[in-house]
Image (spheres, rainbow, N blue to C red):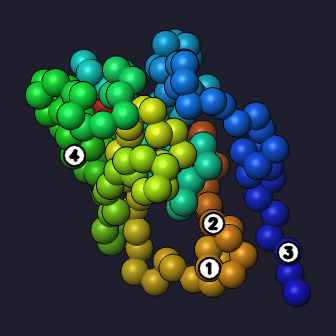
Amino acid sequence: MESLHAPWRIQYILGPKRAAQGESPFSEMARAGDDEAHHIIGRSRCCFAVLNTFPYGAGHILVVPYQQVATLDELMDEEMLDLLKLVRRCVRALKESMHPDGCNVGLNLGRAAGAGIEDHLHIHIVPRWLGDTNFMPILAQTAVIPEALKETAAKLRTALAAQN
């Protein structure tokens, strides 16, 4: 039997778990000002796009409103429109730079729905390729990410910037 090592996952497994109150990690990273260090690939007026540090698959993007809200009802119409426009741009950037066969786009609202950060909604964009599902996520609860986040972020930043 061969072993597959994913050492970046241990940070998530052993890292401190935050309480559901207070400022979210998304709010902290949006304000930090070091987009490259946080893998932020794009910003718009009301939201930003960031690579998921603990992705389900290569190119997994989160689109997050700056305003920390838990539900869609708490967003103003302008924020909702800006959020979806950035989702559209990110899907386009993924298609241009990673050539997926499709994308999963969705929200997990509330703990029961699988929200890891339930007090700050965010939209997941996960590029998918035909035949990309294998035994690893099912049996080993492991995702195989073929490219480092830094390199993926650089490609997606370039693709997003080209859209302006």
What residue sits right under mark 2 in the picture?
143
Of callouts 1 and 4, which one flags the residue occurring earlier in the amino acid sequence? 4
Location of residue 11 by image quarter: top right
Query: Which residue is labeled 1 in the image?
Result: 138
**Could you say which disc has been placed on residue 3 in the image?**
3
At label 3, counting other C-alpha atoms closer than 10 Å, the crowd grade (few under 14, some 14-19, many 20 or more) is few
- The amino acid type of the residue labelled 3 equals Ser
Image coordinates for residue 161, horizontal then vertical, percent: 31, 31
Earlier residue among tags 1 and 2? 1
- Pick the front one: 156 or 64: 64
Quadrant assignment, res 21? top right
Q: Residue at left 63%, top 66%?
A: 143
**Callout 3: SS:** loop
Three-letter residue code for mark 4: Arg
Q: Which mark is residue 88?
A: 4
Residue that appears at 37% across and 47% down? 109
Whole-angstrom CA distance, mark 1 to mark 4, is: 29 Å
